[in-house]
Amino acid sequence: MRLPYAHNNAVATQLKRGEAGFDENDLQAARVLAESLLLREPGQGRAHLIAGIRTQCDGRLVDAEHHFRRALLATPEDVDAIYGLALVPFEQRNVSAALSFIEHAVAHDSNNARYQFRKGIVLGARARRRVA
């Protein structure tokens, strides 16, 4: 994950620790840090992104979508939030909405292998639906 500008060192430190939780597969630590930060800074976009990923991992897709949208409101150029928004409809089997978001993410960062890989998965799902 990329860490965008945080307005103070305490927020930046907490965001880095939350993101490190994902890197270390400590989803509980990431959740606790995101929730703690959102209590203090409810508009912090990156904290909403972390919370969105965490709630998506729990299968709470409505909550995940809410957090991804809040992340985009706070930081409209956060491509990871756009990517997160692609994952929610894909899990809900809404391939067209997923493709729309993933194409938006790829347009912002065409060199990102994760976005390109996910686009291939979504396109494959769309092709299978057309055949079925």
Image (cartoon, rainbow, N blue to C red):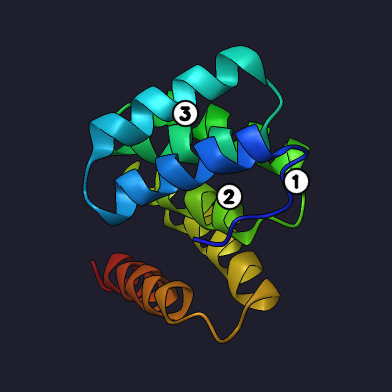
Estimate how packed mark 1 is, as few (under 14), some (14 to 19) or many (20 or more) residues with alpha carbons within 10 Å: some
Upstream in the sequence, badge 1 or badge 3? 3
* Residue shown at the point (32%, 75%) measured from the top left: 124
Question: Secondary structure under badge 3?
Answer: helix
Mark 3 touching mark 2, by CB under 8 A? no
* Residue shown at the point (69%, 73%) measured from the top left: 108
* Residue shown at the point (60%, 54%) measured from the top left: 82
Upstream in the sequence, badge 3 or badge 2? 3
Mark 1 touching mark 2, by CB under 8 A? yes
Q: In this view, does 103 lie above or below 19?
A: below
Q: Residue at label 1?
A: 75
Question: Secondary structure under badge 1?
Answer: loop
How far apart in space, not on screen, are marks 3 and 2 (Cα)?
15 Å
Give residue 31's position: percent from left, percent from top.
36, 28
Regarding residue 120, the answer to whether it shows in the image is: yes
How far apart in space, not on screen, are marks 1 and 2 (Cα)?
9 Å
Q: Residue at label 3?
A: 34
Q: Residue at label 2?
A: 81
